Amino acid sequence: MLEDIFEKIKEYDNIVIARHIGVDPDALASQIALRDSIKKTFPNKKVYAVGSSSTKFNYFPKLDKMEELNNAMLIVVDTPDQKRVDINNFDQFKYYIKIDHHPFIEKYAQMEYIDDKASSASELVYRLITTTDLEMDYDIAKTIFLGIVSDTNRFLFNSSHKTFKIISDLLEIYDLDLPSLYSNIYMRPLNEVRLQGYIAENLNVTEYGLASIKITNDIISQFGVDSGSAGNLINNFNYIEEVLVWVAISEDVKNNLIKLNIRSRGPIINHIAEKYNGGGHHYASGARVTSMDEVDKFLNELNEACKVYLENLGDNDENK
Ligand code: AMP
């Protein structure tokens, strides 16, 4: 399949690379690394990495403004369903390829390379580059490193021997400067750390291990952070004994939305997120709702999932 993707890349002179809305570092890294590798290998091709970004990801090479293109191929990375592809004119392409590491939702491309055991979309792009004649350089290596490190939360999740081998190779071949790369990803304003303290103080935890925090617009303003950064703080609440599933509920007044960032170290959560205009991985998902009533319904479902998970654990213990 990787060779087939390479053949298609050879065939098309105009290539657009897109990824999901609600940009994150792995989505950006995988599309930018792929763009830069194709451009390095085939300097005469027009290759665009498109979608909206955020200033907090300025440490990545820049995205492109898309031009009107004829006879173009679209490659979508890191996106399991068509409705979340961050592109306006999805229908205008001649050929479609998907490269993704999410659990399968729907087929929307003629060629789909999916490995939901892979750490990240960046790992898949690395595989594509290194098993075909696509070229790599220091900057591409850096971008891939940033994507893998971010999506695994520094190797806490989904990291296999393959992931560590890639990282080892990147460090050995390109002599990457870890402190400067880590500061790109992990440097944050004091306000965010203070909000993290607020969350720790105010986390509501049920008897079945569902932790949630409502980060209202007032709290967001009080701490002077944006609602996206507030929700991302959820990643810092793993490995708490009393907590199985944890959710940040952030008001986004500008877009008239309530964003849910959900993580789990037990029950599978993406099928619940899917019922609330969301989705994602088994243990890391997101959703969007418009009222606190929906949030409460969602939390009840998650709490029930935690309860069932604990009961099953108990049953298994008894059978030992
Ligand atoms: P986040 O909590 O935003 O870091 O997202 C965790 C995972 O869930 C990522 O794989 C996202 O692509 C996915 N995800 C987040 N929000 C949504 C959504 N509204 N719909 C589908 N997937 C989502």
Image: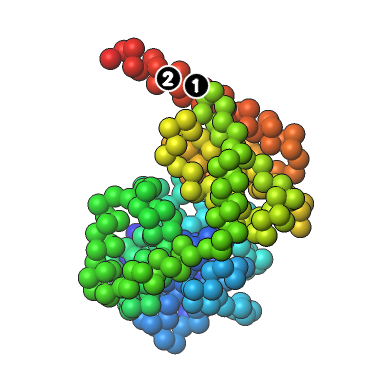
For the residues bearing labels 2 and 1, Cβ distance under 8 angstroms: yes
Residue hosting label 2: 312
Give the numbered dot on residue 308.
Answer: 1
Looking at the image, residue 55 sits to the left or right of residue 292; the answer is: left
**Residue name at image x 28 percent, y 69 percent:** 170
Say above or below: 310 vs 174. above
**Residue name at image x 48 percent, y 33 percent:** 243
On the image, the x and y values in percent for residue 64 come to 57, 78
Three-letter code, disc 2: Asn
**Residue name at image x 50 percent, y 21 percent:** 308
Q: Gap between marks 2 and 1, in whole Å?
A: 6 Å
207, 283: nearer the viewer: 207
Q: Quadrant of residue 203?
A: top right
**Residue name at image x 33 percent, y 50 percent:** 159
Three-letter code, disc 1: Val
Say above or below: 80 vs 242. below
Give the SS element for disc 2.
helix
Give the numbered dot on residue 246.
Answer: none
Give the SS element for disc 1.
helix
On the image, the x and y values in percent for residue 214 come to 66, 41
